[in-house]
Image: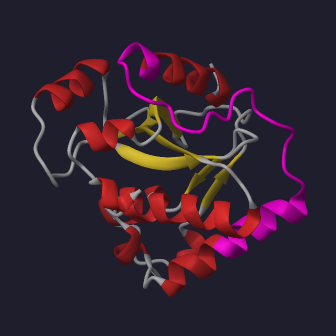
Amino acid sequence: MNYKDRFITATGKTKELDLNVGSNVLPFKKKFSKKKQQQILHLCANALRHYGYSTSSSLASQCTPVHLMLKSVLKENLGINSVITIGDRFWNDYIYCEMSYESINEELSNVKQDQPIKAHVWLTLPDGTILDCTGEAHADLIFERGEHPLEQCLMYVDPLSVEDPKTGYHRPYLVGEDFLLKAGVIGMEML
């Protein structure tokens, strides 16, 4: 299975749970040009620096606010409609922010306002690319890889890349902000 297939499944599961998927990016569009990819990464790096995110430690554990902000920045500056994606990252010997549909239902049944949830958040771009600006930063801390500058924390992953459990890959479970709202992670003012 590749990311595109997992994303399609996550979109369906989100709808099954009566959660709004937000701006739907399916079907995925033509892959962005190298020039557009560079514009996206440059804009994100500048926005992150502007808001005080410059190293692994400043980005780690900030996936929700960082990606909500970047979603808005990409729309306002480049006209790109991205979608918040919620899931985990899988390695053969570790699962970062491990999720299941059982844990999702528990979160929705036992809402704790403004409390973190065990989930990772990133953006999926209209061409299916994963834009994750916090996952590597948190991995730097978890795996004691040391502090790294912002530019080394940005992940821009092709949706058709081969999933390798040795190097890790993203597993989407839900699409859109609705889960974050209904689970009490964010309030309406963050949208």
Q: Quadrant of the C terminus?
A: bottom left
Q: Is residue 175 left or right of residue 178?
A: right
Q: In which quarter of the view is residue 64 placed?
A: bottom left
Q: Which residues are magenta?
A: 14-43
**30 part of magenta stretch:** yes
Q: Is residue 121 above or below residue 183?
A: below
Residue 74 image offset from top left, x and y in percent = 65, 63
Residue 62 image offset from top left, x and y in percent = 35, 64
Q: Is residue 177 visible?
A: yes
Identity of the residue drawn at 63% across and 20% down: 5
Q: Is residue 40 above or below residue 55?
A: above
Count up the numbered dots: 0
- Furthest residue to the front? 188
Between 6 and 186, the one nearer to me in the picture = 186
Residue 179 image offset from top left, x and y in percent = 33, 36
Between 191 and 138, the one nearer to me in the picture = 191
Q: Is residue 63 left or right of residue 71?
A: left
Q: How is the image coloured?
A: secondary structure
Identity of the residue drawn at 69% across and 68% down: 41
Identity of the residue drawn at 88% across and 59% down: 34
**162 part of magenta stretch:** no
